[in-house]
Amino acid sequence: TFALDPPRHATLLATFENTLAKLQTQPLHPTLVQVARASGRIMETLLDTVPVERERAWAHQCNTSHQRLVQLCDELEADFAKLGTPASRDAEARKDKEAEEEVANLSHELEGTGTAKQMRDSQAQRLDRLTKDHGDV
């Protein structure tokens, strides 16, 4: 399931601060440091090249979205579990099929014996007789 096997990005979010700490330990090439100083900026490590606050806000937003996704997946899994086991769903499907077959058999039986047709014809005759008698009165 999703909750038991989190995607790779979840690991990236969990290790975000460690990644920033690693960037702090990686010095820039001396030429880049000199170019930065010449333009009035102080850049000595890879972390100095990253807009940290903006990236932290983005990581926080991603983490919040990820937590909500995990919650929704857990709810979906719980709701699905309420539907029963695969065996119980198969048994229910078999019962549904048996009921459909029984209805079809009864329908064919009614059509085959002509009972439904006889009932309809009898009711039509009664209606005709009542209509005629009403007209005579």
Image: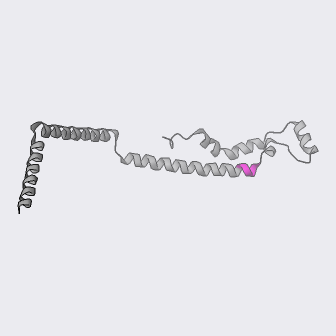
Report the side of 47 relative to 132 (left or right): right
Query: Which color scheme is applied?
Result: one colour
Report the side of 87 relative to 56 (left or right): left
Q: Position of residue 37 (x, y in %)?
A: 92, 44
Nearer-the-camera pick, 119 or 136: 136
Q: Residue at x 10, y 50 (%)?
A: 123
Q: Which residues are magenta?
A: 51-55
The outermost residue toward the front is: 136
Q: Position of residue 124 (x, y in %)?
A: 11, 49
Nearer-the-camera pick, 114 or 108: 114
Q: Residue at x 10, y 57 (%)?
A: 131
Q: How many marks?
A: 0
Q: Position of residue 16 (x, y in %)?
A: 68, 45
Q: Residue at x 91, y 40 (%)?
A: 35
Q: Is residue 21 magenta?
A: no
The outermost residue toward the bottom is: 137
Q: Is most of the magenta stretch helix, strand or loop? A: helix
Report the side of 4 relative to 88 (left or right): right
Q: Residue at x 65, y 51 (%)?
A: 60
Quadrant, the C terminus: bottom left
Vertical placement of residue 32 versus 69, above or below:
above
Q: Is residue 52 magenta?
A: yes
Q: Position of residue 21 (x, y in %)?
A: 74, 45
Residue 50 location, quadrant: top right
Report the side of 50 relative to 66 (left or right): right
